Amino acid sequence: MPILRAVLALLLVLSGAAADAQTPNFSGFWTLDREASDITPPAFSGGRGGASIDRLFVTHAANDTVVIGTETNGLKAWHYTPGQEGTIPVGRDTTMRAAARWEGRRLVAEGTRGEMRMHEVMTLSDGGGRLTIEGTTTTPEGVTRNRLVYLKDRPVGACEAWAMPCKDFTHQQR
């Protein structure tokens, strides 16, 4: 009987360690908590997100890709896939090479375009109800640091209700 208890205790410890090793799921509709944030425009490197950073839509896909978009700037959404390098939009018509990785439960992204360097860290707290994005942008003009704190909000809902609603093309002929 003592051996059975020891085995059960070991399994319990191992299952807890496996749960701790899981990466967080950033998916959700997030609303900026301006009082808890420290913002110096632009909020994201290269002006990503545009002027409207008050709401973020985040999809964390099964393949670990994290897609981030603002409510009124959907065409300029960006994404990170840990362990891979890709491009993210910066400015109106330019992109930046960026790579992401997991550091424990933090998603870290770094990128460079010319003399501009960006470093962003995404974390969840308060049981998944608070998303913090800490960003540092370095240019020849200096360093800009931002701390954006978002609170998880209501579900996104139908896209017809968004600030820039989707269009229904199902009745059009192809």
Image (cartoon, rainbow, N blue to C red):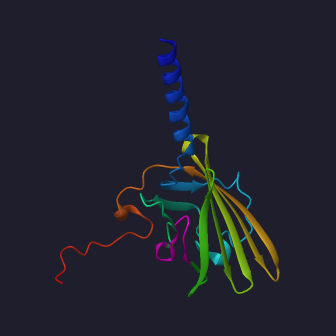
Q: Farthest residue toward the top?
A: 1
- Residue name at image x 42 percent, y 56 percent: 156
Q: Which residues are magenta?
A: 74-87
Figure check: 69 above or below 102 = below
Q: Does 146 sit left or right of 59 as displayed? A: right
Confirm whether residue 125 shows in the render: yes
Residue 82 located left or right of residue 75: right
Q: Quadrant of residue 84?
A: bottom right
| Residue at the (70%, 51%) spot, across then down | 36
Place of residue 13 in the rendered image (x, y in percent of width and height, measured from the top left): 55, 30
Tell me how many marks there are: 0
The percent position of residue 152, horizontal first and vertical second, equals 53, 49
Q: Is residue 43 above or below residue 150?
A: below
Seen from the viewer's position, the closer of residues 56 and 17 is 17
Q: Nearer the viewer, residue 144 or 63?
A: 63
The quadrant the C terminus occupies is: bottom left
Tell me if residue 84 is in the magenta stretch.
yes
